[in-house]
Amino acid sequence: VQLVESGGGSVQAGGSLKLSCLVTGWTFGKCGMAWHRQAPGKERELVSKITKEGKTIYGDSVKGRFTISQDSDANILYLEMNSLRTDDTAVYYCAAQGILWRPPTYTHTCLSNWYWGQGTQVTVS
């Protein structure tokens, strides 16, 4: 499984960015996907996630400003960020939940481990 983020950059407060995460070797729609971020000197925190049931969850600080979505045909997870603030400055990581497939019927189980991308820097000034 490989995850590659893109779309980060520098933007003024109040502006917008849209992050993308290309996921390969993983099947969309089976287990959870998420965006996390880590600011300098702070712990990594959840920004948003799509659960295995398809429910979207947002961190309190981004509710109403950020939108998570996915394009399963293109294998891409998105994070649209609007009304950006200086405290949104961080490295943003996408993550995909591990999947265990059981042959011969190939039922699946969502695992506790997650795969991570390398991160993309977002700087808001």
Image: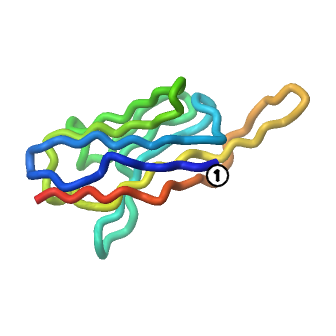
Position in image of residue 18 (x %, y %): 29, 40
117, above or below 108, in the image? below
Query: What amino acid type is highlighted by mark number 1?
Result: Ser
95, above or below 40, in the image? above
Q: Is residue 36 left or right of residue 22?
A: left
| Furthest-right residue in this view | 104
Q: Quadrant of the C terminus?
A: bottom left
**Residue 122 location, quadrant:** bottom left
| Residue holding disc 1 | 112
Q: Is residue 95 left or right of residue 19?
A: right
Q: Is residue 83 left or right of residue 54?
A: left
**Residue 29 location, quadrant:** top right
Q: Nearer the viewer, residue 62 or 5?
A: 5
What kind of element bears circle 1?
A: strand
Name the residue rendered at 58%, 53% in the picture.
115
Name the residue rendered at 9%, 45% in the picture.
14
Q: Nearer the viewer, residue 58 or 3?
A: 3
Position in image of residue 114 (x %, y %): 59, 52
